[in-house]
Amino acid sequence: MLDVKNLSVKLGGAQILENVSFTAREGEWLMILGPNGAGKSTLVNAISGGVPYTGEVRLDGENVHRMKPRVRARKLGVLSQNHHVSYAFTVEEIVRMGRYAHARGLFSPRSGEDEAHFLDAVEKTGLSGFLNQSVLTVSGGEMQRAFLAQLLCQDPRLMLLDEPTNHLDPKYQKQIFDLVRRWVAQSGRCVVSVVHDLSLARAYGTHALLLKDGRVCASGGIRAVLTDEHLRQVYDMDVSGWMRTLYEGWTEETT
Ligand code: ADP
Ligand code: MG
């Protein structure tokens, strides 16, 4: 579904990404992993058209950046790491904007399908109590859920998510990850996401792309990528050993 070939990005004279290539297929949840500054967000931004790059980004064989914006919006939905909102939209308005790509005209009335998608997205993200609140006043987690709900409303074929549960408490982390897993299981869909928590990545990802200093260190099936050896190379520490120690803390007697 998504084909990225020799993607390179230079910003302010620095080479941020160098010859990154990978493919994500229907039904897959590809985790983009790597330490701070590895280039994960830059990769997401290049694919979504926010950063100039050299190389190729194809969606179903078609160059993503030659598609008309509305055609592209039906295929590709993006959740960025930072949300910039400068106007006091309500949560409801933010969520409904997701239907723009499906509207027949700018001022066309809402269809029953729009309404069904809207209600479903609100329910799944637990936002029904916040619909009339300005997004300028909601918490980080509520804001994150509002933009996720917008993406569910948009219902693209490929979701690109940059740290989707960054601001979320464990209940919503689980809810969102379970939700995305069910979403990608429907036919014709694919998820590519940056996830910081390696345990979550391992539990939910089908595939992974491990980056270090703007280059691909490993890619393929999630378990083949997340080996002790690869993690040590990329993070300069015994990551899996540390994870095990942390989890052992939960299995010990606390009395
Ligand atoms: P990640 O998401 O993996 O933590 P980023 O993709 O945000 O990393 O950033 C990768 C590197 O590129 C970082 O070292 C960052 O400082 C640098 N960088 C990002 N944007 C710019 C820019 N506009 N100009 C110069 N350097 C940048
Ligand atoms: Mg980032």
Image (spheres, rainbow, N blue to C red):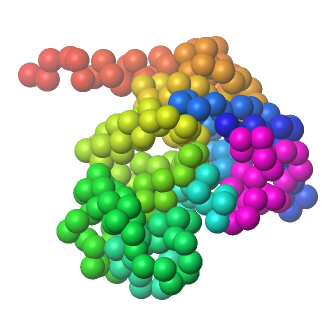
**How far across and how far down the image is residue 8, in percent?**
85, 46
**How far across and how far down the image is residue 29, in percent?**
53, 33
In screen coordinates, is 204 left or right of 9? left
Q: Residue furthest left?
A: 255
Question: Which residue is painted at 35% across and 37% down in the image?
Answer: 178
Tell me which corner region of the image, top left, top right, bottom left or bottom right, holds residue 91: bottom left
Tell me which corner region of the image, top left, top right, bottom left or bottom right, holds residue 253: top left
In screen coordinates, is 207 left or right of 143? right
**Residue 95 lies in the magenta stretch:** no
Please state which of residues 211 and 62 is positioned toward the viewer in this rendering.
62
**How far across and how far down the image is residue 217, in percent?**
74, 26
Q: Is residue 69 above or below residue 2?
A: below
Q: Is residue 212 above or below residue 76?
A: above
In screen coordinates, is 145 left or right of 108? left
**Residue 57 lies in the magenta stretch:** yes
**Which stretch appears magenta?**
46-69
Question: Which residue is painted at 39% across and 69% down in the image?
Answer: 111
**How far across and how far down the image is residue 27, in percent?**
53, 30
Residue 131 visible in the displayed image:
yes
Q: Is residue 233 above or below residue 122?
A: above
Question: Which residue is painted at 77% across and 41% down in the image?
Answer: 61
